[in-house]
Amino acid sequence: MARAAAWTGGFAAATGAVLGAIVGLLCWLPDAGVSGHPLSAVKGGVLGFLAAQHGGLTLDGVPIGLAPLLGLTVVALLAWRAGTTLAEVAGQLRERRQRALVGAAVVQALTFAAACLILVPFSALGTTSAQPIPVAVAAFVLFGSVALIALLRGRLALVVPAHVLAGLRGAAGALAVYVGAGAVLVAGSLVLHATTATQMSRQVGGGISGLPVLVLGVLCAPNAAVAGAAYIAGPGFAVGSGTMFTAFSSGHGLLPAFPLLAALPTGRGAPPVVLIWMAVSVLVAGLVAVRLAARRDGLRAVAVAAGAAGCGMGLLAWLGGGAVGTGRLRTIGASPWQAGFAVAGEIATIALVYLAVRAIRERVAGRAPVGRRDEPELAGVGASDSDR
């Protein structure tokens, strides 16, 4: 069991490093004649994989805490696959002891973190490198959490109360609505500001030479979707100190020429169509949460859904934000606690209103008078006295 755990953890780290190296080479190929040795591209791709652990890195001496969420999602998928494989091995060995399973998950996460730690010196590019201890700790926590859930998911239904599972499903549904609505908002804004995005793209390298910037924009697209979700929830997000974007105010300042930033709101507040989209999104998220959660012990499940959705939104805001240096861009993304409390409060309010309306309707329906027949029932012709 321990051997399988170590093998799957190391294989997941190797797979992630190879995927990062492939992305680095694809970005290097368009300018292969002038952009340096291909080994540098491989190192850059592995460095991107390590940065996806959310442990931070140092870029030309500047600390970077912002990590592309798409890369982190890939790491989570690798962890889920590793946990699922380990569960299959445990099934084949008929290992059901919880202590043994948790121990195997710890070995798996330690192996993954150790492999990431080994990759740190290899991926260094001059003054650009990952931070060894933070990367190892972040890799262990991220990989271990996801892999452990994948390993024990079959047992969760047996030990976790039904209303908690229902509440977690409701929270997941609500978060999907928030993030999906945020992604639609960002995509629509990019379409409306396509000219600005094109100009920014040319400033940082147009044509095929701009492929690395395009790849970085795709990797950061989930970060933008989370920021859009926080915008819909109300607290908004920041892109630098003193540059806060909400539905009713927008603080503008000097920003880097990054094409994805063309989607930032303009003007003093959101237009009516955006306000309507925000209201509809919040309402749908609350209804999805209560409909999924209230199937089991309504009030308690809804409480779990609201709390879990708030915690989930706070976690997403923390993962999707970060700092770029210690200067003006040291604050990027949504405030985790503000976004979390806003989402929890909105879902709880909508759910309570929904449950109250449903209870009133059920009470009114229960008190409705039963229809009475005006005419007596006649016995059938030719029926016997006993049948009448």
Image (cartoon, rainbow, N blue to C red):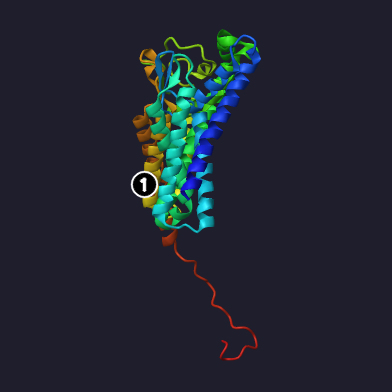
Residue at screen point 41% across, 27% down: 55
Q: Is residue 270 above or below residue 95?
A: above
Q: Is residue 218 above or below residue 33?
A: below
* Image position, residue 242 (x, y; %): 36, 15
Q: Quadrant of the C terminus?
A: bottom right
Q: Can residue 291 be seen?
A: no
Relative image position of residue 2 (x, y in whole percent): 46, 48
Q: Which residue is mark 1?
A: 303
Position of 384 with respect to 7 (left or right) is right
SS assignment at label 1: helix
- Compared with 46, 155 (above or below) is below
- Give the residue type at disc 1: Ala
- Judged from this view, the residue extending furthest toward the bottom is 385
Residue 246 image offset from top left, x and y in percent: 41, 22
The one of 237 and 286 positioned closer to us in this rendering: 237
Q: Quadrant of residue 110?
A: top left
In this rendered view, identify the residue nearer to me: 139 or 292.
139
Q: How many marks?
A: 1
Q: Nearer the viewer, residue 154 or 238?
A: 154
Image location of residue 264, percent across then percent down:
49, 18
Task: Work out whether residue 144 can be spotted.
Answer: yes
Q: Nearer the viewer, residue 134 or 236?
A: 134
Q: Which residue is at a point 52% across and 71% down the rendered structure image?
A: 373
Residue visible at 40% across and 36% down?
Answer: 343
Q: Badge 1, how many Cα within 10 Å: few under 14, some, many 20+?
A: many
Q: Is residue 273 toward the left or the right of residue 22 in the image?
A: left
